[in-house]
Amino acid sequence: MNRERQLSGVNSYTRELGFNPLEVLAAGLVGAGRAEPSAAAGWLDLCCGTGRALIQAAGELRMAGLTERTLLVGVDLVDAFDPLPSPLSNLELICGSVANWAPTRTFELITCLHGLHYVGDKLAVLTRAAGWLTPTGRLVADLDLSSIRLPDGRPAGQRLTARLRAEGFSYDPRHRRISCTGRREVRLPYSYLGADDRAGANYTGQPAVHSHYAEDH
Protein backbone atom coordinates (compact mmCIF):
# COMPACT_ATOMS: atom_id res chain seq x y z
CA MET A 1 0.00 0.00 0.00
CA ASN A 2 1.43 3.35 -1.04
CA ARG A 3 0.66 5.50 1.98
CA GLU A 4 2.27 8.68 0.61
CA ARG A 5 0.43 9.08 -2.69
CA GLN A 6 -0.16 12.72 -3.66
CA LEU A 7 -3.12 14.42 -5.29
CA SER A 8 -1.47 14.92 -8.69
CA GLY A 9 1.80 14.10 -10.39
CA VAL A 10 3.69 10.85 -10.95
CA ASN A 11 2.76 9.05 -7.73
CA SER A 12 -0.75 10.36 -7.34
CA TYR A 13 -4.46 9.76 -7.07
CA THR A 14 -5.00 11.58 -10.35
CA ARG A 15 -2.66 9.24 -12.20
CA GLU A 16 -3.97 6.12 -10.48
CA LEU A 17 -7.64 6.94 -10.97
CA GLY A 18 -7.39 8.58 -14.37
CA PHE A 19 -9.16 11.70 -13.12
CA ASN A 20 -8.55 14.43 -10.57
CA PRO A 21 -10.81 14.00 -7.52
CA LEU A 22 -11.28 17.76 -7.38
CA GLU A 23 -12.99 17.63 -10.77
CA VAL A 24 -15.64 15.35 -9.26
CA LEU A 25 -16.17 17.77 -6.39
CA ALA A 26 -16.43 20.66 -8.85
CA ALA A 27 -19.08 18.77 -10.80
CA GLY A 28 -20.94 18.16 -7.55
CA LEU A 29 -20.94 21.86 -6.81
CA VAL A 30 -22.16 22.75 -10.29
CA GLY A 31 -24.96 20.23 -9.83
CA ALA A 32 -25.89 21.94 -6.65
CA GLY A 33 -29.22 22.87 -8.04
CA ARG A 34 -29.79 19.65 -6.12
CA ALA A 35 -32.22 19.15 -3.27
CA GLU A 36 -29.82 20.66 -0.70
CA PRO A 37 -27.89 23.40 -2.51
CA SER A 38 -26.23 24.47 0.74
CA ALA A 39 -24.70 21.03 1.38
CA ALA A 40 -20.93 20.82 0.96
CA ALA A 41 -19.59 18.56 -1.79
CA GLY A 42 -17.69 15.71 -0.15
CA TRP A 43 -14.81 13.34 -0.90
CA LEU A 44 -14.28 10.35 1.40
CA ASP A 45 -10.98 8.48 1.12
CA LEU A 46 -10.93 5.10 2.87
CA CYS A 47 -7.51 3.73 3.88
CA CYS A 48 -6.10 7.18 3.14
CA GLY A 49 -2.55 6.52 4.41
CA THR A 50 -0.82 9.73 5.44
CA GLY A 51 -3.71 11.77 4.05
CA ARG A 52 -1.28 13.68 1.86
CA ALA A 53 -3.60 13.87 -1.15
CA LEU A 54 -6.48 15.12 0.98
CA ILE A 55 -4.29 17.75 2.63
CA GLN A 56 -3.11 18.96 -0.77
CA ALA A 57 -6.69 18.97 -2.06
CA ALA A 58 -7.90 21.00 0.92
CA GLY A 59 -5.14 23.53 0.24
CA GLU A 60 -6.14 23.86 -3.41
CA LEU A 61 -9.79 24.27 -2.47
CA ARG A 62 -8.89 27.02 -0.02
CA MET A 63 -6.96 28.86 -2.73
CA ALA A 64 -10.03 28.57 -4.96
CA GLY A 65 -12.27 29.98 -2.23
CA LEU A 66 -14.19 26.71 -1.86
CA THR A 67 -13.35 25.73 1.70
CA GLU A 68 -16.86 26.40 2.98
CA ARG A 69 -18.45 24.47 0.13
CA THR A 70 -16.44 21.26 0.40
CA LEU A 71 -15.62 18.53 2.92
CA LEU A 72 -12.76 16.06 2.68
CA VAL A 73 -12.66 13.04 5.00
CA GLY A 74 -9.88 10.48 5.30
CA VAL A 75 -10.01 7.29 7.38
CA ASP A 76 -7.04 5.07 8.15
CA LEU A 77 -6.23 2.45 10.77
CA VAL A 78 -2.80 3.95 11.44
CA ASP A 79 -2.52 7.39 13.04
CA ALA A 80 0.40 8.54 10.88
CA PHE A 81 -1.10 11.49 9.05
CA ASP A 82 1.09 14.19 7.57
CA PRO A 83 1.17 17.40 9.63
CA LEU A 84 -1.12 20.14 8.37
CA PRO A 85 0.70 23.16 6.93
CA SER A 86 -2.08 25.33 8.37
CA PRO A 87 -5.58 24.79 9.81
CA LEU A 88 -7.94 23.36 7.18
CA SER A 89 -11.56 23.57 8.28
CA ASN A 90 -12.88 21.39 5.44
CA LEU A 91 -10.60 18.44 6.26
CA GLU A 92 -11.14 15.58 8.72
CA LEU A 93 -8.50 12.86 9.18
CA ILE A 94 -9.83 10.02 11.30
CA CYS A 95 -7.89 7.16 12.85
CA GLY A 96 -10.17 4.14 12.79
CA SER A 97 -11.06 0.88 11.10
CA VAL A 98 -12.92 1.17 7.81
CA ALA A 99 -14.66 -2.06 8.81
CA ASN A 100 -16.44 -0.32 11.71
CA TRP A 101 -16.44 3.40 10.95
CA ALA A 102 -19.47 5.02 9.31
CA PRO A 103 -20.10 8.62 8.19
CA THR A 104 -23.05 10.82 9.06
CA ARG A 105 -23.42 12.25 5.54
CA THR A 106 -23.15 11.23 1.90
CA PHE A 107 -20.36 11.95 -0.58
CA GLU A 108 -19.88 12.89 -4.23
CA LEU A 109 -16.74 10.74 -4.34
CA ILE A 110 -15.55 7.76 -2.31
CA THR A 111 -12.14 6.25 -3.04
CA CYS A 112 -10.15 3.33 -1.64
CA LEU A 113 -6.85 2.93 -3.48
CA HIS A 114 -5.30 -0.46 -2.70
CA GLY A 115 -6.68 -0.38 0.84
CA LEU A 116 -9.07 -3.32 0.47
CA HIS A 117 -6.10 -5.65 -0.09
CA TYR A 118 -5.45 -5.48 3.67
CA VAL A 119 -9.05 -5.59 4.93
CA GLY A 120 -10.73 -8.74 6.22
CA ASP A 121 -14.37 -8.33 5.23
CA LYS A 122 -13.82 -6.61 1.89
CA LEU A 123 -17.37 -7.11 0.64
CA ALA A 124 -18.86 -5.46 3.73
CA VAL A 125 -16.71 -2.35 3.31
CA LEU A 126 -17.57 -2.18 -0.38
CA THR A 127 -21.31 -2.62 0.03
CA ARG A 128 -21.53 -0.20 2.97
CA ALA A 129 -19.60 2.44 1.03
CA ALA A 130 -22.07 2.18 -1.85
CA GLY A 131 -24.75 3.35 0.57
CA TRP A 132 -22.75 6.47 1.46
CA LEU A 133 -22.93 8.00 -2.01
CA THR A 134 -25.11 10.87 -3.13
CA PRO A 135 -27.63 9.98 -5.88
CA THR A 136 -24.96 10.84 -8.48
CA GLY A 137 -21.89 10.07 -6.36
CA ARG A 138 -19.05 7.86 -7.52
CA LEU A 139 -17.30 5.00 -5.69
CA VAL A 140 -13.94 3.74 -6.98
CA ALA A 141 -11.86 1.07 -5.24
CA ASP A 142 -9.06 -1.35 -6.04
CA LEU A 143 -10.28 -4.91 -5.55
CA ASP A 144 -8.43 -8.11 -6.41
CA LEU A 145 -11.27 -10.60 -6.81
CA SER A 146 -8.84 -13.51 -6.55
CA SER A 147 -8.42 -12.60 -2.88
CA ILE A 148 -12.08 -13.37 -2.16
CA ARG A 149 -12.24 -17.08 -1.43
CA LEU A 150 -14.83 -19.76 -0.75
CA PRO A 151 -14.55 -22.12 2.25
CA ASP A 152 -12.48 -24.62 0.25
CA GLY A 153 -9.97 -21.92 -0.68
CA ARG A 154 -11.06 -21.45 -4.29
CA PRO A 155 -11.59 -17.89 -5.57
CA ALA A 156 -15.25 -16.89 -5.66
CA GLY A 157 -14.74 -16.26 -9.38
CA GLN A 158 -17.24 -15.34 -12.06
CA ARG A 159 -20.29 -15.99 -9.90
CA LEU A 160 -19.23 -13.19 -7.55
CA THR A 161 -18.39 -10.90 -10.47
CA ALA A 162 -21.84 -11.48 -11.95
CA ARG A 163 -23.53 -10.76 -8.63
CA LEU A 164 -21.58 -7.55 -8.17
CA ARG A 165 -22.59 -6.41 -11.64
CA ALA A 166 -26.21 -7.31 -10.94
CA GLU A 167 -26.04 -4.96 -7.94
CA GLY A 168 -24.86 -2.10 -10.14
CA PHE A 169 -21.08 -2.35 -9.84
CA SER A 170 -18.69 -2.27 -12.79
CA TYR A 171 -15.48 -4.29 -12.61
CA ASP A 172 -12.34 -3.69 -14.66
CA PRO A 173 -10.32 -6.94 -14.53
CA ARG A 174 -7.29 -5.39 -16.22
CA HIS A 175 -6.85 -2.76 -13.52
CA ARG A 176 -8.59 -4.83 -10.81
CA ARG A 177 -10.85 -1.90 -10.05
CA ILE A 178 -14.48 -1.81 -9.01
CA SER A 179 -16.81 1.18 -9.23
CA CYS A 180 -20.40 2.26 -9.08
CA THR A 181 -22.35 5.48 -9.53
CA GLY A 182 -25.24 6.54 -7.33
CA ARG A 183 -26.24 5.49 -3.84
CA ARG A 184 -27.50 1.94 -3.58
CA GLU A 185 -28.44 -0.61 -0.95
CA VAL A 186 -26.41 -3.69 -1.85
CA ARG A 187 -27.23 -7.21 -0.73
CA LEU A 188 -24.73 -9.92 -1.65
CA PRO A 189 -25.43 -13.59 -0.79
CA TYR A 190 -22.14 -14.14 1.04
CA SER A 191 -21.39 -14.61 4.74
CA TYR A 192 -17.96 -13.60 5.99
CA LEU A 193 -16.01 -16.46 7.58
CA GLY A 194 -12.67 -14.84 8.34
CA ALA A 195 -9.40 -13.71 6.80
CA ASP A 196 -6.00 -15.19 6.06
CA ASP A 197 -3.25 -12.63 6.61
CA ARG A 198 -0.58 -15.13 5.53
CA ALA A 199 -1.79 -15.34 1.94
CA GLY A 200 1.43 -13.78 0.62
CA ALA A 201 1.97 -11.12 -2.01
CA ASN A 202 -0.74 -10.15 -4.46
CA TYR A 203 -0.40 -8.50 -7.88
CA THR A 204 1.08 -5.36 -6.30
CA GLY A 205 3.98 -7.36 -4.90
CA GLN A 206 2.91 -6.55 -1.33
CA PRO A 207 1.59 -9.02 1.28
CA ALA A 208 -2.19 -9.06 1.19
CA VAL A 209 -5.15 -10.65 2.96
CA HIS A 210 -7.46 -13.33 1.58
CA SER A 211 -11.08 -13.01 2.67
CA HIS A 212 -13.17 -16.17 3.04
CA TYR A 213 -16.93 -16.30 2.51
CA ALA A 214 -19.68 -18.89 2.39
CA GLU A 215 -22.35 -18.54 -0.27
CA ASP A 216 -25.83 -18.11 1.18
CA HIS A 217 -28.47 -20.38 -0.30
Image (cartoon, rainbow, N blue to C red):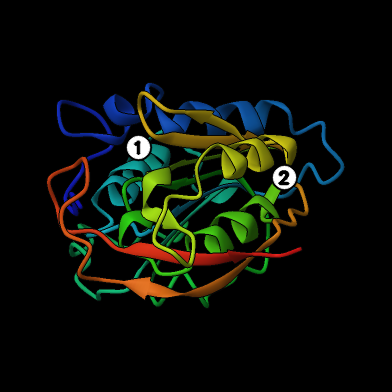
Q: Residue at x 29, y 45 (%)?
A: 53
Instruction: Please indicate whether residue 52 sits to the left or right of residue 154 in the image.
Output: left
Tell me if residue 198 comes above or below residue 49 in the rendering.
below
Q: Position of residue 40 (x, y in %)?
A: 64, 49
Q: Tell me which numbered mark, 2 or 1, is placed earlier along the sequence.
A: 1
Instruction: Farthest residue to the right: give it.
Output: 35
Tell me if residue 151 comes above or below residue 158 in the rendering.
below
Q: Residue at x 43, y 34 (%)?
A: 177
Tell me if residue 146 comes above or below residue 178 in the rendering.
below
Q: Position of residue 87 (x, y in %)?
A: 32, 63
Q: Secondary structure at mark 2?
A: strand
Please name whichever residue, 147 or 8, is drawn nearer the observer in this view of the structure: 147
Task: Tell me if mark 2 has few (under 14), some (14-19) or many (20+) residues whose alpha carbon lies within 10 angstroms of its own.
Answer: many
Q: Residue at x 66, y 55 (%)?
A: 132
Residue of label 1? 60
Task: Tell me if mark 1 has few (under 14), some (14-19) or many (20+) residues whose alpha carbon lies within 10 angstroms of its own.
Answer: some
In the rendered image, the quadrant that contains the C terminus is bottom right
Q: Secondary structure at mark 1?
A: helix
- Mark 2 and mark 1 in contact? Answer it, CB < 8 Å: no
Total marks shown come to: 2
Mark number, residue 99:
none
Please name whichever residue, 11 or 165, is drawn nearer the observer in this view of the structure: 165
Q: Is residue 143 visible?
A: no
Alpha-carbon span between mark 2 and mark 1: 23 Å
Which amino acid type is shown beneath numbered disc 2? Thr
Question: Which numbered disc, 2 or 1, marks the residue closer to the eye?
Answer: 2
Q: Quadrant of residue 123?
A: bottom right
Residue of label 2? 134
